[in-house]
Image: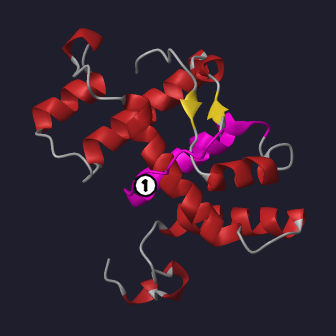
Amino acid sequence: MREAKSDVALKGQLWIDYIEKLRGKIFENQWQLYALCISIGIMYDEQVEFEQLENQNTSVPRLMLNRMENRNLLDYMLQTAVLTTKNLELDEKTRLVLAFGDEKDKDPNFNEYSFLTKFANYGLKVIDDEIGGYTNDIEMMEALMTFLNDKFENGVQPGLDLNSIDFSQLEE
């Protein structure tokens, strides 16, 4: 992952609303919300582009992005997304170069941060769908945790309830 030379702009009213709503209550900073949203977007393999609002300056600071532990996480998420997404029309070799190649071999026009931010935008929309109706901080936190636990246990396939499957009927 290339070193961030500038902050990553978080465009749209939804980012403003959720940074205000969740920072200091559930997340310490924008970075934590951004990272969670990227992972949700990658999990669903969906991207969304948000429009920049006039005078909007919501962002994830480049100093936060360039911390070693955060860069490592971004590297992992980028590799996962590039290799698995249907949102890129690239052959396998090009995907491997983007995911694991030397910086000099990568397409200079491919913006890694923009690519991941589109996943983050979708992830934020999912979070909004799950907790947008709550105004109470505790209920909002419980709804978010329930959503995350359900997705961790069951994945993103709707209607899959592992608890309803009778495994005793399976042959050994």
Residue at (35% x, 29% y) in the render: 111
Side of 3 relative to 66 (left or right): left
Q: Quadrant of residue 100?
A: top left
Quadrant for the N terminus in the image:
top left
Residue 45 x, y percent position in the rendering: 37, 56
Side of 61 relative to 44 (left or right): right
Q: Give the magenta range.
A: 28-55
Side of 96 relative to 170 (left or right): left
Label 1: few (<14), some (14–19) or many (≥20) C-alpha neighbours in 10 Å = some
Q: Which residue is mark 1?
A: 48
Foreground of the two, 54 or 163 = 54
Residue 36 x, y percent position in the rendering: 60, 47
Foreground of the two, 166 or 16 = 16
Identify the element where label 1 is drawn.
Answer: loop
Residue at (43% x, 55% y) in the render: 48
Q: As drawn, which residue projects farthest toward the front? A: 54
Quadrant for the C terminus in the image:
bottom left
Q: Is residue 44 above or below residue 26?
A: below
User: Residue 35: within the magenta?
Assistant: yes
Q: Amino acid at mark 1?
A: Val
User: Residue 26: within the magenta?
Assistant: no
Residue 85 x, y percent position in the rendering: 29, 50
